[in-house]
Structure formats: C-alpha cells, structure tokens
Image (tube, rainbow, N blue to C red):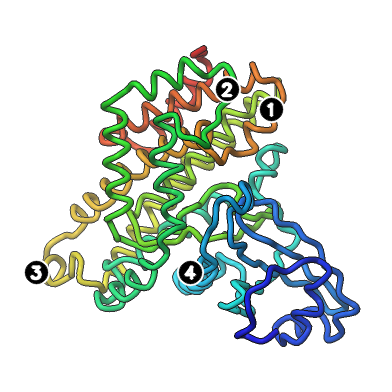
Amino acid sequence: MSPSAEYKALSVETLPARLGGIDAITSGVGADPSQWSVQEVGDGNLNLVFIVSGPIGSVIVKQALPYVRLVGDSWPLPLYRAYYEYHALTRQAARAPGSVPSVLHFDEDQALIVMEFLQPHVILRRKLINGERVEGLAAFLGEFCARTAFRGSELSMASADKKSDVSLFAGNVEIPAITEALVFTDPYYDAEMNNHTKGLEPVVSALRGDVPLKVKVQQMLQSFASNTETMVHGDLHSGSIMSTPSSSRIIDPEFVQYGPMGFDIGMLCANFLMAYFSQPAHRGADAETYQGWILSVIEETCAVFEAEFRRLWASERTGMLYPAALFEDQGQDSVPACDAVLAGIWRDAWCVCGIEMHRRCLSLAHNADFEEIGDMTVRARLEARNLMLGADLIRMCDNLSGAGAVCDMARDFNGRDFL
C-alpha cells in the first residue's frame, strides 16, 4: 500500500493484498500474505479492527471509518482521528511505560494503526459482567491515571512543550464534540438520538427538571472545553481496558484532548460504579461478594492515584507550576499546594463520574453492563439507582471526602428503589 494511496476501507478479503508489503506486519506475522488469517473483531462504535495472524505471530490492524459505525454514514466523522490516536499512544507510552499496546506502524492517509496484539487479554467490561477478578487492576489504573495526568501537565512539562502539544491536539475537533454533546448535553434534554429503558421516565423527568444540576453539568462542560491541564485519554472506561487475570493495558485513546486532570479517573470510576449496580442481574444471590470487590477496586484505584500523584509531585515537579523556588528552596513545605491541586482534581472527577453515569443510560451509546439485562423491569430498577447516585455525585462533588464516601453512598443506593 502506498502511503499516499487514496483512502479505502479494509476488509477481511482485501487486507492481505493491501498490507502485504508493510514490514511491520510481515516481520510480526509472516512474509507470505497467502498464509495470513484475518478476523474482523471491531465491536465498538467507530472503527474497523482486525486480528492478522500468520506463521510468526499476530498483530492488530485498526482503521478509522469516515462515519460513526454505530449509526452509519448519516453521521460522518473525520479520518484524522487516527492521527491523534497515534500521537496519544506514543505519549501515553512515554508517560506511563508499559500501559498501552506498542505501535508498530502508522499510515496517516489510510487512517490506519498497526499495533501489538494483546493476548490473552480480553475487554475488562466483559470480565466484570462475567464476575472475573483481575489481580493488580487498581494499582495499574491508579498509576496510569496519575502518571498521564501529572506528566502531561505543566507540573512536569516545559511550558513551551505543553503549549505545542495543546496546539497539536486542538485540531481534534469533531471527536471531542461527540463527548461535549453525548456526555454533557444530550442526557439532559430530549435529544434526537437519546434512548432509555422503558420505566425510567420519572427519574429522567426529575433529572431534566433539576436546573441547579444542569448548571453544574454545564460548568463541567465549560471546564472540559476550555481547561487544558493535561492530555486526557478522553474515553477511559472498562471497554477501553484489556486484561488477563493478572495484567492490563489501556486502548482506544482516539477521544484524546487536553482537558481537566480529573476527567479520566472520574469517567473510569463511573464505569466501575455502573458495573457495581448491574451485578444483581448478572450474579443473582452471589452479587454482594463481587460487588464488594468492585468497590474495593474503586477505592484502591483512587488511593493509588493520590499516592502516585504525590510521589511525582515530590520527585518530578519540574514545570512552571508550583516551582521549588517558591517552596522547598525557601525551606517551605509544598504539601498544602499539592493538597489544593488534588482537591480540584477530585472535585472534577466526581462531577464527571456522575455525568458519565447519566449519559450511559440516557444518551446514545449505552454500555453492556446494563444493556445485557434482558428483563426491562430489573434493568430499569438498577439503572435508576445508578442515575440517582450520579445526580448526588454531581450535586455534592465539591464536598465529598473521598472514594470511601462515594462507595458508602453506592452501598446505600444499592439497597434503595426509586421507581
């Protein structure tokens, strides 16, 4: 395939002939494309994803489509998102080594990335639905979020480098616009592509009628759109994590942008809370024990995030923000400054958490934790708990004492009925 060839979507049938001359693939799969096997495994909303296997091994080929796959060509999307995903992966690999798949090849014209094939990793959301545990999950996620947040900010980066990066990723306009609509706006009015489980109407009406709540959500949207604190993954949920029983990797950062430091960990916690609330339908009488494990992951992830952030504050605070010249060099403690920065991160995180809990039940793109519950009455009851906790997290985000308090609230809401 010529790097300057006109874009054309790949297929299982055409991939070997079109990519057979790329060294990054032949060196990892085998030199003879006739011996390759190709499987299309993309189950997301936006892209084509293929596993290409041969005598030597396997690689992943991911190609952007010029539209939203979930909707069809009536919703066009720019192919340039692959360019930003490639740059996000390279930065995540540098800022949190070992956390993302290795990039083997990138073709901007074909919106195509060839990556390391993660095996036997499977999507974490599937593991959560199945009731499986992942050793070391919280430590991995807490460190990833802290390292990418800190090292992508002017706490660590030279200001000129940070501003250059902000400028680069500012071109990723239409993908973050999806977040701005589907996450922050559409759940709170009768948007065209919204859908929700039958029976939730009283809860939906209450949320959309809560003006102070919507003001808080829009304030968070304003921050998301204008606050360039750090490079965020932008779509960090349990479907963007692949795990084995003892290791994990982060995938799919195409929603990357510079935004608030609390965004990624807030979205992540929301998806664990949704997994928590869905468990009675998946585990039945055995739900309580596994639900306890999910909450322990939330608490430990947040504790690791804070500990790692403080470690980086003490050892890697080399940017223009809170310089040692203002604190340590004068014999003064910078811990109160770190405390204040973390307080702002957690305020944003819990607000984002509540908003994400709303959008996954009320907007366009739902998640399998609830969607695979066949009994609509049961699903609505569990989603209502999720929606109501989300509302309280938004309202209370300025005053929550930490992840432990959030998990205590989840336990309380898990025993309540709102319909």
**Which residue has dot 2 on it?**
382
Amino acid under label 4? Tyr
Q: Residue at x 63, y 50 (%)?
A: 72
Q: What is the distance, in whole Å, between disc 2 and disc 3 at their CAs? A: 54 Å
Do the residues under discs 1 and 2 have CB atoms within 8 angstroms? yes
Q: Quadrant of residue 209?
A: top left
Position of residue 180 relative to residue 278, above or below, is: below
Which comes before the other along the chain, label 4 or label 2? 4
Q: Comparing marks 4 and 3, which lies closer to the viewer?
A: 4
Query: Where is mark 3, residue-wise?
Result: 330
4 relative position to 117: left or right: left
Figure quadrant of residue 315: bottom left
Furthest residue in direction left, as rendered: 330
Query: Closer to the camera: disc 4 or disc 2?
Result: 4
Q: Earlier in the sequence, mark 1 or mark 2?
A: 1
Give the amino acid at mark 1.
Ile
Residue found at the very far right of the displayed protein: 35
